[in-house]
């Protein structure tokens, strides 16, 4: 059985992420979608639990996908979970440069290869940070995120507005 892992911060999960998840789920017997606890991203929009919940709801139709999280090195988690392949999505050429270095380091540390999936052209411009920016400036992101994510983002906007007296 081939097990793959698709790691990311998923803050928030986008339709680009979902596209990679769906395509990878068809290629592997089991796909772990791992929310990375990244200490360098100090102010995530969503808590770890919220990101996991949004992902679970968004991939509920995929029976071989499991949502999890980890802290620390991906290489350590890959070994502990006996993962065969790391999956990463590439949107644009600039993604490749940083992802290649990371893939080579992960291979050095874990002896596990990384498979790159090219983004569907519909989502090649979509990033979590751009989605958040557009959303909080009042733009329509309904075509860029799964419905459970849009719901949770709307809740966050309402909470933010309430806290700010709006």
Image (spheres, rainbow, N blue to C red):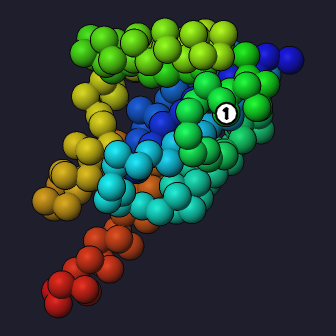
Taking 84 as reference, is 129 left or right? left
Q: In the rendering, at what x and y percent does residue 155 appear?
A: 38, 73
From the viewer's side, name the closer residue of 12 and 96: 96
- The residue wearing badge 1 is 77
Q: In the rendering, at what x and y percent does residue 71 appear?
A: 57, 45
Identify the residue shown where x is 28% and y is 71%. 157
Tell which residue pokes out farthest to the bottom in this image. 165
From the viewer's side, name the closer residue of 101 and 61: 101
**Crowd around label 1: few <14 · some 14–19 · many ≥20 (10 Å):** some
Identify the residue shown where x is 56% and y is 40%. 72
Tell which residue pokes out farthest to the left in this image. 137
Identify the residue shown where x is 25% and y is 15%. 94
Identify the residue shown where x is 67% and y is 33%. 77
Tell me the SS state at disc 1.
helix
Taking 21 as reference, is 46 left or right? left
Tell which residue pokes out farthest to the right in this image. 1
Q: Quadrant of the N terminus?
A: top right
Q: In the rendering, at what x and y percent does residue 148 appear?
A: 50, 58
With respect to residue 160, does 75 lie above or below? above
């Amino acid at each position: 059985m081939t097990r793959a892992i698709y790691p990311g911060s998923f803050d928030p999960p986008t339709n680009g992420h979902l596209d990679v998840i769906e395509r990878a789920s068809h290629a592997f017997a089991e796909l772990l979608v791992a929310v990375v606890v990244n200490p360098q991203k100090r102010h995530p929009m969503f808590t770890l639990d919220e990101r996991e919940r949004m992902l679970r709801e968004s991939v509920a139709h995929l029976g071989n996908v499991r949502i999890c999280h980890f802290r620390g090195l991906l290489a350590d988690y890959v070994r502990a979970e006996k993962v065969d392949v790391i999956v990463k999505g590439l949107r644009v050429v600039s993604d490749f440069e940083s992802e290649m270095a990371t893939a080579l380091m992960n291979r050095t540390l874990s002896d596990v290869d990384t498979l790159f999936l090219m983004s569907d052209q519909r989502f090649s411009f979509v990033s979590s940070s751009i989605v958040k920016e557009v959303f909080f400036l009042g733009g329509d992101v309904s075509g860029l995120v799964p419905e459970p994510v849009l719901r949770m983002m709307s809740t966050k906007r309402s909470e933010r507005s309430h806290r700010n007296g709006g």
